[in-house]
Amino acid sequence: MAGHGPAPTGRAVRGGNGGMRIIAADPMDQPELPEFDVRMDVDGEVTYQSFDWPAITRTWWSMWANSPLSAEFTSTDWSELMDTALLHAKYWGGDTKLAGELRLRVAKFGATPEDRARLKIQFAAADEAEDRGRARASRAGSKQPAPDADPRSVLRAVV
């Protein structure tokens, strides 16, 4: 897929940081969506009108504030997401040619399960649910493998 660069090699494949530079981050709370005017050119006359954020974009913005992913967002992350909010508003206003750009931008933030898998992000709740499932299965007498067992050990040939 274009834009993701070459496959990792060497230390990155073996689980090291692959030469990644690690810096201290200063996460911040989500800012409010800004108020601004948009330029209107009607019949050669230029006017400015206040931009009204659509309700669906306000809901989308709140969703990001409540996402566990945003707990580590810095000012630059929120700035990029704010630009993406404008694309979201225009998309929902009918400018569907922005769909591809909108999809690419939200993917960088881990919007879908596929995006999070690519970014190597997993919600802790998934691990807890898996542990609860294993405990429930063992109480029910299931042949669930131990966490460190080969997961293929429960597979049976079907003839």
Image (cartoon, helix red, strand yellow):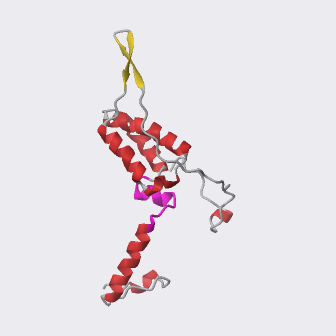
* Quadrant housing the C terminus: bottom left
155 relative position to 26: left or right: left
Q: Residue at x 38, y 40 (%)?
A: 99
- Residue most toward the top? 44
> In the image, residue 106 lies at what x, y percent?
44, 47
The answer to whether residue 112 is magenta is yes
Residue 24 found in image quarter: bottom right
Assess whether residue 114 is covered by the magenta stretch.
yes
Tell me where residue 20 appears, x and y as whole percent: 66, 56
Work out whether residue 159 or residue 112 is closer to the camera in this orientation and state it. Answer: 112
Q: Residue at x 38, y 84 (%)?
A: 155
Residue 76, x across and y down, in percent = 55, 42
Task: Read off the magenta span.
Answer: 111-124
Q: Is residue 142 visible?
A: no
* Residue 115 drawn above or below residue 46: below
Can you see residue 150? yes
Q: Nearer the viewer, residue 155 or 23?
A: 23
Q: Who is closer to the viewer here, 142 or 77?
A: 77
